[in-house]
């Protein structure tokens, strides 16, 4: 039997962040993070990693056919874009004045 490991994963991106793809077929594209799957360490990014999905005819779409939609992309292939400068940056965590752990840009040193 497999053991289930119950650990909370800390990720460098959050929902709503603007990210740049640094590896894969969509390399160089930017988009907004729509959702994150923490268990699989994947993110759904707007306009990135577009795949063709074949759908059967149904009540919603009586014609069926081929639909283009975003597929999840691994978080290691994404880099956060600093909202202040508009450039890609690595992310670190440090305590702010109130003793709360916050993300900061390793390039500029500013809190994100």
Image (cartoon, rainbow, N blue to C red):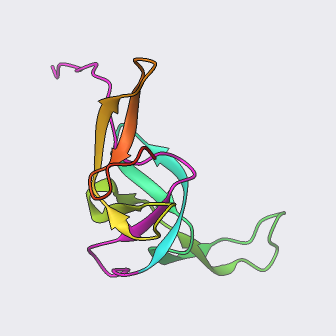
Q: Is residue 55 left or right of residue 57?
A: left
Q: Residue at x 27, y 52 (%)?
A: 106
Picture coordinates of residue 68, whole percent (x, y): 59, 78
| Magenta region | 1-28
Q: Observer-nearest residue: 70 or 15?
A: 15
Q: Residue at x 48, y 76 (%)?
A: 51
Q: Can the viewer see residue 64 in this picture?
A: yes
Q: Is residue 50 left or right of residue 63?
A: left
Q: Residue furthest front?
A: 97
Can residue 26 be found in the magenta stretch? yes
* Most common secondary structure along the magenta stretch: loop
Picture coordinates of residue 97, whole percent (x, y): 42, 23
Picture coordinates of residue 14, whole percent (x, y): 47, 45
Quadrant location of the N terminus?
Answer: top left
Q: Residue at x 63, y 72 (%)?
A: 55
Picture coordinates of residue 46, whole percent (x, y): 57, 67
The relative height of residue 14 versus residue 48 in the rendered view (above or below) is: above
């Amino acid at each position: 039997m497999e053991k289930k490991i119950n650990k909370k994963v800390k990720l460098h991106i959050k929902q709503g962040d603007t990210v740049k793809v640094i590896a894969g077929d969509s390399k160089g594209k930017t988009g907004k993070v729509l959702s994150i799957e923490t268990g699989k360490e994947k993110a759904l990014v707007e306009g990135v990693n577009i795949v063709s999905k074949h759908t059967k005819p149904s009540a919603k779409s009586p014609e069926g056919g081929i639909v283009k939609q975003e597929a999840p992309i691994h978080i290691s292939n994404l880099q956060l874009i600093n909202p202040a400068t508009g450039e890609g940056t690595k992310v670190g965590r440090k305590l702010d004045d109130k003793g709360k752990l916050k993300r900061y840009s390793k390039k500029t040193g500013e809190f994100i």
